Amino acid sequence: MAKEKKAELGFEAKLFSAADKLRNNMDAAEYKHVVLGLIFLKYVSDSFEAKYQELVTGKAEGMDPEDPDEYISENVFWVPEKARWRYISSNARSSEIGRVIDEAMIEIERNNKSLKGTLPKDYARPSLDQVKLGEVVDLIGTISLSDSSNKSKDILGRVYEYFLGQFASAEGKKGGQFYTPNSVVKLLVSMLAPETGSRIYDPCCGSGGMFVQSEEFIEAHGGRIGDVSIYGQESNPTTWRLAKMNLAIRGIDNNLGDTNGDTFLNDKHPDLKADYVIANPPFNMKGWGRPNLMDDVRWKYGLPPENNANFAWVQHFISHLNTKGLAGFVLANGSLSSKTSGEGDIRERLVVEGLVDCIVSMPAQLFYSTGIPACLWFISRDKVSRMNESRNHILFIDARNMGEMIDRTHRQFSDEDVEKISDTYHKWKSGEEYHDITGFCNSASLEDVKANDFILTPGRYVGIEEAEEDGEPYEEKMKRLTSELSELFDESDRLKEEIRKNLGALGFEM
């Protein structure tokens, strides 16, 4: 499966490679918005054209192809004539191409209220090479489409997601601020397994990858896009716009607030009680606003320290779960064992009150923002209602040795890894066919966790994987290894003497 996934990315990889050559000396962080904005522009134009042709050819007799209502009623963005891709493409070699694109973006926002304040509109700036910009327009125009608008949406969605990942990699640490690696998102969603009709919330949603994967999970299990309600928030204004475009390109309705905003100080969804919370908050965030939130009702399990927002995020997530809600999120490994500034006390209360469901330790090099290893937490509000052992236990999974290197500095989980980890969790929750596996997973009682001073590091509970026996008797193995070692020593002595002779012949003595 992993090999098939890589092969599937050939088209996107070639396209990104070609686009990257055109950025000249522009920083990846700046170029990202140039390219992704154009991909979005082509998406809305292609979706519009597909519906336009349907109206023109009489498939919907009596309907006016130039009436915006015909498109809005079908959840298709209305695109004015000078914002359509064919018009933009015809001006690709013009020195005014930047102005043409800016005006197209303005017109699309003006005619589609849900996109207000979303699209980039600075393509005419003097620092942007207009010749190179025209070449990028030509390149984006080569994305092949079929007659099916769904296929078009799928292709452009894949390209957008792939480009997000590649730009995140190019930006390094800064890239992690808007992008969670796809394999980590897949694992979170597979373990949460969101159901049709549910409300999904991410209060630090980055570019919206958690939502995209949640919708894809629903589709893969017999549902449809739109069968879940999406709620999110993002503090960075440019990243908020990326998320809005990413979801629009997938046809996913959403409520990300009227603007970007700080989740702690300006919660855009104060009354929301979600079925699922899924998130990758900033690791070990300082200066998160504690002085202004000392008496906030969210700190039910303890006041988080000023120099680390990890348990502020955890308690914010819990405050937005309904009575049967489930949360899955990424945290730095320090959250599992830190006792400074009251963090240990908060963690203890979460365990004692039966909220901690599962902890997964992950390998290093999964994230663009940091090389340090991280972990996944799963919090369940309905754990006590279960009628099996899991209600009084915590599942610990040690996945530190899983995943595969995809380049010199980055690792990812394979589809098989995701399936193994998520299946283990679901079997444990259901009480069917689950077994502890030394070195991989362990269902620890709350008494065991208490005995470990409420430290939640999986390695403490799963043990060390037993080495496979090779069947060779111990005495015979030691004789063989001793003989091999003796031969190596003899060879070492021979080589040293040979080197000594050679140096002597050159007039050097050892």
Image (cartoon, rainbow, N blue to C red):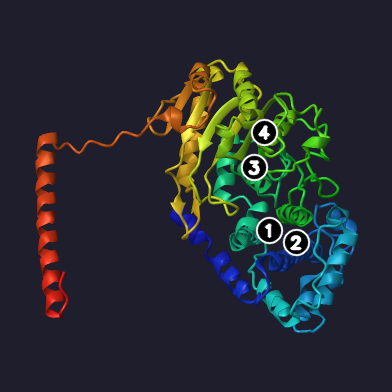
The residue that mark 3 highlights is 284
Q: Which label number is shown at residue 153?
A: 1
Label 3 element class: loop
359 or 79: which is nearer to us?
A: 359
Mark 4 or mark 1, earlier in chain:
1
| Crowding at mark 2 (Cα within 10 Å: few <14, some 14-19, many 20+) | many
96 or 396: which is nearer to us?
A: 396
- Identity of the amino acid at label 2? Ser
Say whether marks 2 and 4 touch (CB < 8 Å): no
The CA span between labels 2 and 4 is 43 Å
Mark 2 or mark 4, earlier in chain:
2
- Identity of the amino acid at label 1? Lys
Marks 2 and 4: which is nearer the front? 4
Say whether marks 4 and 1 touch (CB < 8 Å): no
Label 2 element class: helix
Residue at (53%, 47%) from the top-left corner? 372
Marks 4 and 1: which is nearer the front? 4
| Quarter of the image where the C terminus is located | bottom left
Q: Is 176 left or right of 508, judged from the image as shown?
A: right
Residue 302 visible:
yes
Q: Quadrant of residue 33?
A: bottom right
Residue 227 point in image, percent of width and height = 71, 40
Mark 4 or mark 3, earlier in chain:
3
Residue at (65%, 33%) from the top-left corner? 327
The CA span between labels 3 and 1 is 37 Å
The residue that mark 2 highlights is 47
The residue that mark 4 highlights is 311
